[in-house]
Amino acid sequence: MNQEEILYCQNCKNNETNLRCQKCNQLICYNCMKETPVGYRCSNCVEFIKPPMYKISVITLITSSLIAIVFGFIMGVISIFLIPIQSYYSFITIIGSGFFGLLISQILFIIINWSSNGKRGKKIQIIAVCSIILSSLIRLYISGNIEMGINDLNGFVYLLTGVIVLWDKFK
């Protein structure tokens, strides 16, 4: 009679197993195995590969940054006419500022998404957020009421809405 050999996991050395890594054929137990789309693998063979949407070239970053700056400036000029800079507020102006922040962030998302070829991640998030901040600063600067920036709740609602939407969209 043939006695079956007892095999142990190569990682933890404690557990009996007959399971093998699909890539290197090393023995692995159920505690050490990593499930992948192509089967079970050992921890040595599992590599975290960054998805292509998060791989951003320097040229793409520079191009997206320049386009974001230009459109941030344009949106800042447009926002002067649509969001009043004032020290008193009404429910309507605050709601309008939030709506305009949503609208501008959607437009910036489309433009930056197009210029970066659908890339995502922290770098693109920072570019997008800097663009909406630039538009808010341009709005204050061109209006000539920079000192009103501290009391400008409409501008704050516009900026906060835009930052939250753009940060979320480029995750």
Image (cartoon, rainbow, N blue to C red):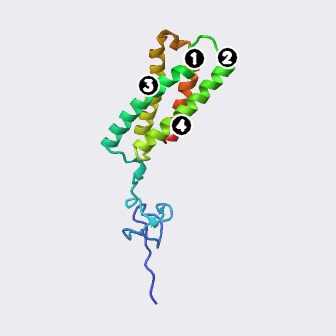
**Numbered tag placed on residue 90 in the rendering:** 2
Q: CA distance from mark 4 to mark 3?
A: 16 Å
Q: Secondary structure at mark 2?
A: loop
Residue 91: x and y in percent read: 68, 20
Q: Is residue 41 above or below residue 81?
A: below
Q: CA distance from mark 4 to mark 2?
A: 24 Å
Amino acid residing under circle 1 = Pro
Say if mark 2 contacts mark 1, CB within 8 Å.
Answer: no
Instruction: Look at 43% across and 64% down and name the residue there.
Output: 41
Residue 68: x and y in percent read: 41, 33
Residue bearing the label numbered 4: 106
Q: CA distance from mark 2 to mark 1?
A: 11 Å
Residue bearing the label numbered 1: 84
Q: CA distance from mark 4 to mark 1?
A: 21 Å
Q: Nearer the viewer, mark 2 or mark 1?
A: 1
Instruction: Look at 44% across and 39% down and name the residue there.
Output: 112
Amino acid residing under circle 3 = Leu
Nearest the viewer among 110 and 8 is: 110
Say if mark 3 contacts mark 1, CB within 8 Å.
Answer: no
Q: Secondary structure at mark 4?
A: helix
Q: Nearer the viewer, mark 3 or mark 1?
A: 1
Q: Is residue 88 left or right of residue 39?
A: right
Q: Is residue 49 above or below residue 23?
A: above
Between disc 4 and disc 2, whose residue precedes?
2
Q: Is residue 76 left or right of residue 59?
A: right
Say if mark 4 contacts mark 3, CB within 8 Å.
Answer: no
Between disc 2 and disc 3, whose residue precedes?
2
Say if mark 2 contacts mark 3, CB within 8 Å.
Answer: no
Residue 96 occupies which quadrant of the picture? top right
Residue 82: x and y in percent read: 56, 22
Task: Count neighbours of disc 2 (C-alpha within 10 A) and say few if under 14, some if 14 to 19, many if 20 or more.
Answer: few
Residue bearing the label numbered 3: 134
